[in-house]
Amino acid sequence: MATATKKPLTAAQFKTKVLHHLNFTSSEVDFQDNPSAVLRAVCLAVNEVVYEKLKETNAAHTEQKARSVNYLSLEYLMGRMLSNNLHNLNLFDIAQKAVADLGFELEDIFEEGHDLALGNGGLGRLAACFLDSLATLDYNAVGYGIHYQHGLFEQQFHKCRQIETPDEWREYGNPWEVCRPEAVQEIPLFGSVETQAQVDGSVKKIWHPGQIIKGVPWDVPIVGYNSKTVNVLRLWESRACSHFDWDQFNAGAYQDAHSAQNQAETISKVLYPNDETEAGKELRFIQQYFFCACSIKDIIKRYQKQYGDDWSEFANQTVIQLNDTHPTIAILELMRTLMDDYDFNWDNAWAMCRQVFAYTNHTLLPEALEKWAVSMFERVLPRHLEILYAINEQFLNHEVARMWPGDVQMRARLSLIEEGQQKMVRMAHLCVVTSFKVNGVAQIHSDLVQSDLFPEFNKLYPGKLTNVTNGVTPRRWLKACNPKLSKLLDTVVKNDWAKELSSLNAVAEYADDAKFQKKFMDIKHENKVKLAGEIHKLTGVEVNPEAIFDVQIKRLHEYKRQHLNFLHILGLYRRLLENPDYDMHPRVFIFGAKAAPGYYLAKEIIYAINKVAERINNDARIKDKLKVVFLPNYRVTLAEKIIPAADVSEQISTAGKEASGTGNMKLALNGAVTIGTLDGANVEIAEEVGDDNIFIFGNTVDQIKAMKVAGYNPWQFYEANEELKDVIDWLRGDFFTPGKPGELGAIAHSLLEGGDPYRVLADYDDYARAQEALDVAYKDSKRWARMAILNTAKMGKFTSDRSIQDYVNNIWKLTPIK
Ligand code: GPK
């Protein structure tokens, strides 16, 4: 298909489009004091370009019969869309002009936008970065997920404690989505299975569902950067099938008439706010099945549009990537569909499934490995449970028995069913058995997946378990969020680094160049001044941009060890109280984190940090040497403001617990220096930047394991370090909570009586040592500038374009669209 090269839009033309939408789509003639109407009109103007490209992309996909990846994910943390889409379409400058002509600053218009926060943390944001890269690299890809009415809750602090309020991201509509009534699906649930004998002696299984739910797709266009492609993220919304029972309504049973509808709509009502843990709730299970079933039907429908009833190309055309175990049920749904709806025999259906599914593991935490009660499974999806049992039987009797004949323990260990009081389905086992590839998300994590999590599967299926190190999109995480640094990089890098991030390597040559150092650090300073304004707006706290901006932004979790950072802050405070002249460069500790609403200790950690911050920030004795701020409602949009201004990146998880991390990459890319453990992608970041440009501390994975074998005793570390002992005792007493002793005691209790499961105390000493080394380095401004520059220069590996290319080469085998 020959696409005529179109002339780029001018600012005047773009302004005409915006005015058109202000007048005719929004009927908003007087928009001067209505920036949100301007935002909507700008989005609609951008969409004119987007839809045109979407149409062309669809045509090219059809014409080229391109193999596609279908990314199944329960979470997508897209953030705001406008700035990103303008950059990716190369419309940023003209939009800025057009909007200025209308009397607005483009940046103020952005502030009217709402985050698409349909995810919790790293896993959801990774999915968003991957969609950006897939479109940028011109791959045929569809993201599938749930159109949650409420995304991740909004966080406020009330008397230092986290309060959650519902996210209302589309209360007044969302310009970035299109409803597709022509692609609605119907999804069965509950009921029973009938076994019908056939004339040929075989049996046919017929599922008689107890309920049918409607799945309504909403498409969010995904615009590639400087590419031809616009893909879609297709999000399913649940609705009742027969909308309204008028008989009941007329008979006065309003409640009943509404209840079926309410029940159906509950499925896509709200995102579960737990990061890396599973509650085992039926509604969550139904969410998973609902979106998988809609997506499988949609994938088949797309295929049949091209190939009709000929299934021979399906496996060539389709790969389905499972983003963690959350969409595992898609495997059973495809099996069921092929056998029950399309008359596949078992072997052919199973062979098909084994060719199309691949699975990404994102965590080793045992509490995050999904298991579903067999009893619940049977009630909700009786037919799927039958299929699961049949897969298990075949797996155990053929594959396991062949490798380990007569080994009953091995059978029990690998079985898809965990025996016990309550029989459970092990979703990860189903993923590993079925998928043709299983990947971890950073090298050290993938090694641990092979050696510790699935060693038997690794033996059974050599070569199946592999690694794809995570990455982040440099479009959002440098070009759009840090325009000043981006422009500086443009002056010394010839290639378009946003598309070829490894070309940033050229910046390394300037690491010792005094002029470049000054420019680089001046930009960092300007970004810090801007963030200081934001911090003041959000917390009322004044911070000094000359101080070190030390940042820890991520979900609140014990394994991420915000409390290690916190204890060290208390240690610094203690040193300053003992000696107000204690030699340290002033430091601002900046936190951003949401805690799962039901995660008690995580919420106590937030409370303690806020409480201590109140005291420290108002303590005149220590002057400006120490400030602590916890920014409320951490989300993609706030990350975009914090990251460009960070000097220090805290990546301090217990070794072996953080699968990869991706914030570590974003911060380093923007010139922050990492203080971190040898965990997740920190290991690979250290390899890239070199030992001189990162502060590594703490026990390694092997040392952590050895401590467990030897018997870990947190009291020993408490007794051995006077500072550590003192600050923990502060928390146990009423130093920060006069008259209320022990109000901050939960942390101390978990570290001592609770056995310190994440080895915080074991790493305190070395963490404090690394922090001192960092302080020394910062005071040498030339040395620090060099470190910061080299961090930016050496991040080429961590673009999500590289991750996607790894997936393509080793797993998906796609070819780009021409
Ligand atoms: C892992 F298992 C999970 C999960 O449920 N949610 C989530 O955000 C994260 N993750 C890991 O904790 C990070 O280390 C990793 O970088 C990220 O997934 C993306 O792979």
Image: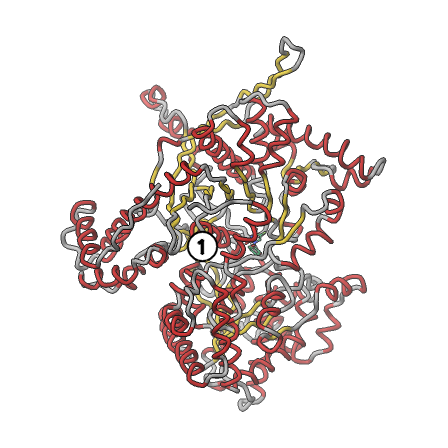
Image quadrant assignment for residue 711: bottom right
**Which residue is drawn at the image coordinates 47% and 82% (left, top)?**
619
**Which residue is drawn at the image coordinates 66% and 68% (left, top)?**
760
Q: Residue 340, how many percent across, how many down?
A: 57, 22
Q: Does residue 93 appear left or right of residue 285 in this picture?
A: left
Q: Amino acid at mark 1?
A: Glu
Q: Residue 382, how many percent across, how many down?
A: 60, 26
Q: Nearer the viewer, residue 145 or 300?
A: 300
Report the number of discs: 1
Q: Does residue 638 appear left or right of residue 700 in this picture?
A: left
Q: Nearer the viewer, residue 250 or 127?
A: 127
**Which residue is drawn at the image coordinates 64% and 15% (left, top)?**
203
Image quadrant assignment for residue 390: top right
Q: Nearer the viewer, residue 359 or 716?
A: 359
Determine if residue 152 is in view.
no
Q: Residue 662, how many percent across, how many down?
A: 53, 60
Q: Residue furthest bottom?
A: 581
Image quadrant assignment for residue 231: top left
Q: Is residue 19 above or below residue 252?
A: below
Q: Does residue 475 appear left or right of residue 377 in this picture?
A: left
Q: Residue furthest left?
A: 29
Q: Which residue is mark 1?
A: 164
**Disc 1: CA contacts within 10 A as few (<14), some (14-19) or many (>=20):** some
